[in-house]
Amino acid sequence: MNRAIVFPKSGRIKYLFLALAACFVIVFTIASYAWLHPWHDVGLSVPFQSFFFSKSTSGVVSTAWNESLAFGEVLYISMPYRTDRQDAMDLLSSMSGIKLTLIEGVSGDDINAKAVPDNADLKPSVLGCWRAHADAWRYVIDNNLETALILEDDIDWDKNIHQIFQDLSVQMQNNKLRLDPPTDHERTSAPYGLDWDILLMGQCLDMANPQRLDLVQVYDDPNVPSRKDTQEVFLKQMEDLGVAGDDVGKKRLLSPAYGPACTMGYAVTRRGAQRLLLNLSYMGLRGPVDNDMAWTLQDGKIRGYTVTPPLFTAWRVGGQKDSDNVTPDQNQPIVGKGNKGGTSRNLKSSARIAMVKELEMHNWVDYNNRGTVEEQKEKGKS
């Protein structure tokens, strides 16, 4: 005769406790998985998803896989009339699982003479460029962001950008450039640390401080561009910093920022935004925004790191679309090669090129091939 098993009261309490504990573990595991895999909510398609699944989920570095690359926000600067570039940036960021906030560019002609910083004898387009970046710094301060990534609107990045930034975050937490070890807050909540003011990642060039070559940090990165895809100016800089030969195409470097040019992509801390606004507005402006950044770094009034080869690079289409710093010449073509013929350098796998391939469709060919596939299946059954 079958008998029901009856546990003593104390046993029932014990097994009830174990069941509740098991439920808690299951719920916690599911919630943790969802938190660590935010791309499910951003509509990524398969080729861009595939590299996400190789990520490490240990420690604070895993947050580099979120939609802000673990910065407080990702901002990008674009003139209001460059809706073509805004379309491109929205498309590119959506395919890469990154959320962007637009900071409108400024026409220098619209800046009142009273608002021009002391000693700033600059042409309107250069002054407007400075003002747009200053507005981005103000956004960081006004919104109390601990860090922000600031981009310009004519850039490209690697399709494996999240993996690249995860690797970078490990180096930023542990490197020889730091004056002090990471704080508990940095270890748990600030993947890139907070010991810097500006982190340069979209420069045209930089130079090493010849007195501080001991501060260079070299690290492995599987997404470094090959020698042929790296511009000569960066190959020379890498050689000056100790990376040459077979290490090119395998190693990336962190070094003290000293003489950067261009502002295609850089990050700031809140304190860095304050110091930039102090030195490049309140106290005056000595030249174009990137030049004055370099001079301020050399003066030691801000602390910066440079990543080489850079993580952001210009997307060039030719013609007059490549620059907003000059008035269009009505006698010259505007379009150039267009995005179909566009190119970028210093990347292993262009996200813009990958984006086009991923969204490519041949609808009628797919319909025509469907019958062929079904016929093959039927033949396989016979």
Image: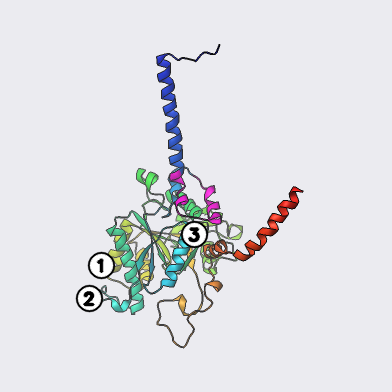
Q: Is residue 202 visible?
A: no
Residue 75 appears at what percent x and percent y? Answer: 38, 62
Q: Choose mark 3 or mark 2, whichever is in front.
A: 3
The residue stretch that appears in magenta = 34-56
Q: What amino acid type is highlighted by mark number 3? A: Met
**Observer-nearest residue: 250 or 47?**
47
SS assignment at label 1: helix
Q: Residue furthest bottom?
A: 331
The circle drawn on residue 95 is 3
Q: How far apart are the alpha carbons under marks 2 and 1?
A: 13 Å
Q: Which of the two labelled residues, at mark 2 and mark 1, occupies the earlier sequence position? A: 2
- Is residue 65 rendered magenta in the image? no
**Observer-nearest residue: 246 or 242?**
246
- Which residue appears at 61% of the width and 58% of the height? 246
Q: Residue furthest left?
A: 114
Q: Are marks 3 and 2 in contact (CB under 8 Å)?
A: no
Q: Quadrant of the N terminus?
A: top right
Q: Residues within 10 Å of mark 2 (few under 14, many from 20)?
A: few
Q: How far apart are the alpha carbons under marks 3 and 2?
A: 43 Å
Identify the residue under disc 2.
114
Q: Which of the two labelled residues, at mark 3 and mark 2, occupies the earlier sequence position? A: 3
- Give the left or right position of residue 218, taking residue 278 as reference: right
Q: Is residue 6 visible?
A: yes
- Give the left or right position of residue 178, taking residue 282 as reference: right
